[in-house]
Image: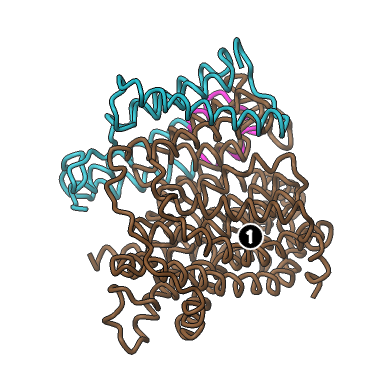
Chain colours: A brown, B cyan
């Protein structure tokens, strides 16, 4: 129960202010169609630079929690999910809006998000420390395989194509090698003065997540205002709370599936929401009502995608393997604030880590209160034109990038990466494995070179990296995730 | 999405992957120190291998199709994209010369005028948009420069 001793750090005026601001910004950004939670968190990282690590992480955590819930607003009102995690919410949520029950649907959404989110954070609190102890046994070879496993899992299970996902991950690793060799200190791939410092993690995060979204908003500008924003209809909050809590089965299915999916690295909220929706429909007495405005559909989907948030941080904080693309971005935030996943988080940085985790718990309360209030005015948020959002994101992205090291080179690299990623995403390459390659690249290379020295002075390189139970488990997981992804993609092609 | 469209997309995806893998392999192996470039060389070899797997799987696909999706839109909407892309690049290139806030103001205004529904020549609309851009700049200047004390390039102006 160590976490209870660190609650006082969350309840300072400054941190409460950050939680309020982060939750509000997350809900608004999540509600804006076309802006992903991952991009919102990536864009916010530079603004946490000048903050204490705990404060910066509180802001990022509040945004992560609330963007997922905020995405349901646009899913319900305009049938455009704010994030992939809200796809299942739109199935019944938008139909309820069509029936003039948008306010009711939004209330179910935030109440079930709160319930699922709370359960997910409790899993994070109780599962993370024992798992982190396991990381104490890791030497260079295990840490090398952990980094490779993170990239492999996000690149295979989290991507539409195994080869593209792995190629993107390897390209991220390649980009991470620009700059000095960690052992010999000699420069590599420095063809211009702009590349002397290599590719900074935050520069990559902003370039790969924010700029492609700006270009997508430009490209879709002609389609703006074509969707109708529904009127909210009658609002009966207490009735909704009572009804929501009485839908115990849907809440349990959603929260349980969200928790399990969250712990699996790379799976993400989209899968959680859709699987929970499907299971709730299958076990319902009236499965035919689903897809026609059934509240259980919203309750299951929203409790699942928010229950996923906490558990997605379990493998991240213990083994540096993110459970979702947004968690991958959060890993960048942790490293920038000097926090390396593993047992040190709970010993050396215990106060910061517990403050961060506790703030996620408190953020759930802020999310439900602000969310319920904001949903009454959500029609206004939906009316923000896409090109205005694009202009704001572009200016903030350039500012955020420059502010990291006051470097114009960073801005150029960010823009180049953004242009590259926009076109790459049109061809099916995702940014998440690429970012993870850049983040985990230095960890993989450092430990590979250290392991090489140890191996060469002992039984040999191959033996050092492939012997021992942990190494063998990690190698099996890498191979297993590739084989599983190939199998499931073949299966879906055969089904088509 | 029909097979012909997937084929078109896969062609470009395969080419994209192959070009990047080949370029990185050349940069890693050509006139470089094997000790310093050991890790990049291993990565580039794996990238080339995966790019070749992609080429082989592409060659087993169906005949080519049009470069558009099922709604008839091009896969890359150059016409809509070109203006915004140009403004973004120009903003970054002018940032050091004009200053961050001036180039951001011009880029912000250019984007909302270019992608707005009303005609550029409408003086009332132009005045409103200029006001919105200026207000946004004042807001971020106050927040970043005055409150957070983050210095951005000033150039000729601010």
Displayed quadrant of residue A465: bottom right
User: Which residue occupies 29% across, 36% down?
Assistant: B76
In the foreground, A329 or A374: A374
Q: Is residue A194 above or below residue B19?
A: above
In the foreground, A355 or A105: A105
Q: Which residues are magenta?
A: B24-44
Tell me the subunit letter for badge 1.
A
Q: Tell me if A334 is positioned left or right of B101 in this view.
A: right
Give the position of the N terminus of chain A as an image quadrant: bottom right
Q: Is residue B140 above or below residue A453?
A: above
Give how far across and how far down residue B34 sits, in percent: 62, 32
User: What residue sits right under mark 1 in the picture?
Assistant: A316
Q: Is residue A391 above or below residue A147?
A: above
User: Which residue occupies 46% across, 74% down?
Assistant: A236
Mark count: 1
Displayed quadrant of residue A286: bottom left
- Residue B17 in view (yes/no): no
Q: Tell me if A279 is positioned left or right of A98 in this view.
A: right
Give how far across and how far down residue A367 sits, in percent: 58, 62
Q: Magenta stretch containing residue A46, yes or no? A: no
- Residue B110 in view (yes/no): yes
Q: Residues within 10 Å of mark 1 (few under 14, many from 20)?
A: many
Q: Magenta stretch containing residue B31, yes or no? A: yes
Give the position of the C terminus of chain A as an image quadrant: bottom left
- Provide the secondary structure element on which disc 1 rests: helix
Give how far across and how far down residue A478 sits, in percent: 53, 61
Q: Taken as a whole, is the magenta stretch helix, strand or loop?
A: helix
Give how far across and how far down residue A215 sits, in percent: 40, 36
In the foreground, A393 or A216: A393
Residue furthest out toward the bottom: A285
């Amino acid at each position: 129960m160590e976490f209870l001793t660190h609650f006082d750090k969350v309840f300072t005026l400054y941190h409460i202010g950050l939680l309020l601001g982060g939750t509000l910004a997350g809900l608004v950004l999540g509600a804006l169609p076309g802006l992903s939670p991952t991009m919102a968190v990536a864009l916010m990282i530079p603004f946490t630079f000048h903050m204490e690590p705990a404060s910066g992480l509180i802001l990022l955590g509040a945004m992560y929690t609330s963007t997922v819930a905020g995405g349901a607003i646009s899913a319900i009102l305009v049938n455009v999910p704010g994030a992939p995690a809200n796809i299942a919410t739109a199935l019944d949520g938008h139909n309820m809006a069509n029936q003039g029950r948008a306010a009711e649907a939004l209330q179910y959404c935030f109440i079930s998000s709160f319930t699922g989110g709370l359960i997910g954070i409790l899993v994070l609190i109780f599962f993370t420390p024992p798992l982190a102890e396991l990381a104490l046994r890791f030497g260079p070879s295990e840490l090398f395989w952990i980094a490779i496993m993170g990239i492999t899992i996000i690149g295979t299970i989290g991507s539409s194509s195994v080869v593209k996902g792995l190629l993107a991950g390897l390209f991220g690793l390649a980009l991470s090698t620009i700059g000095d060799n960690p052992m010999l200190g000699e420069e590599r791939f420095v063809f211009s003065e702009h590349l002397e410092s290599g590719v900074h993690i935050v520069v990559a995060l902003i370039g790969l997540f924010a700029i492609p979204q700006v270009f997508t908003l430009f490209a879709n500008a002609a389609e703006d205002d074509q969707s109708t924003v529904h009127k909210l209809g009658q609002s009966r909050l207490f009735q909704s709370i009572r009804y929501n809590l009485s839908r115990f089965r849907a809440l349990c299915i959603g929260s349980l599936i969200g928790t399990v999916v969250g712990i699996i690295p790379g799976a993400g909220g989209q899968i959680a929401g859709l699987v929970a929706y499907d299971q709730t429909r299958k076990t319902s007495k009236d499965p035919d009502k689903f897809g026609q405005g059934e509240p259980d559909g919203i309750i299951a989907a929203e409790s699942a995608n928010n229950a996923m948030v906490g558990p997605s941080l379990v493998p991240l904080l213990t083994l540096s393997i993110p459970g979702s693309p947004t968690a991958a971005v959060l890993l960048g935030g942790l490293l920038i604030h000097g926090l390396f996943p593993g047992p040190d988080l709970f010993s050396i940085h215990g106060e910061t880590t517990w403050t961060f985790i506790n703030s996620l718990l408190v953020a759930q309360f802020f999310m439900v209160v602000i969310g319920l209030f904001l949903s009454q005015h959500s029609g206004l948020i939906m009316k923000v034109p896409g090109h205005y959002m694009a202009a704001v994101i572009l200016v903030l992205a350039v500012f955020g990038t420059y502010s990291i090291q006051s470097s114009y080179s960073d801005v150029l690299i960010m823009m180049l990466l953004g242009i590259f990623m926009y076109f790459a995403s049109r061809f099916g390459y995702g940014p998440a494995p690429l970012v993870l390659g850049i983040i985990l690249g230095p960890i993989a290379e450092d430990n590979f070179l250290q392991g090489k020295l140890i191996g060469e002075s002992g039984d040999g390189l191959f033996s050092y990296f492939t012997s021992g139970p942990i190494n063998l488990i990690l190698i099996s997981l890498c191979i297993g995730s590739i084989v599983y992804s190939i199998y499931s993609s073949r299966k879906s092609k055969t089904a088509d | 999405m029909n097979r012909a469209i997937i084929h078109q997309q896969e062609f470009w995806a395969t080419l994209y992957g192959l070009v990047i893998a080949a370029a990185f392999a050349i940069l890693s192996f050509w006139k470089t120190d094997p000790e310093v470039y050991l890790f990049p060389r291993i990565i580039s070899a794996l990238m080339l291998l995966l790019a070749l797997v992609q080429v082989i799987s592409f060659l087993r696909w169906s005949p080519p199709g049009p470069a558009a999706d099922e709604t008839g839109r091009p896969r890359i909407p150059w016409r809509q994209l070109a203006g915004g892309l140009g403004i973004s690049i120009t903003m970054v290139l002018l940032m050091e010369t004009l200053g961050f806030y001036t180039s951001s103001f011009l880029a912000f205004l250019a984007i909302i005028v270019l992608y707005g529904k009303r005609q550029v020549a409408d003086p009332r609309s132009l005045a409103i948009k200029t006001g919105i851009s200026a207000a946004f700049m004042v807001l971020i200047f106050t927040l970043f420069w005055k409150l957070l004390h983050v210095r951005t390039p000033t150039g000729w102006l601010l």
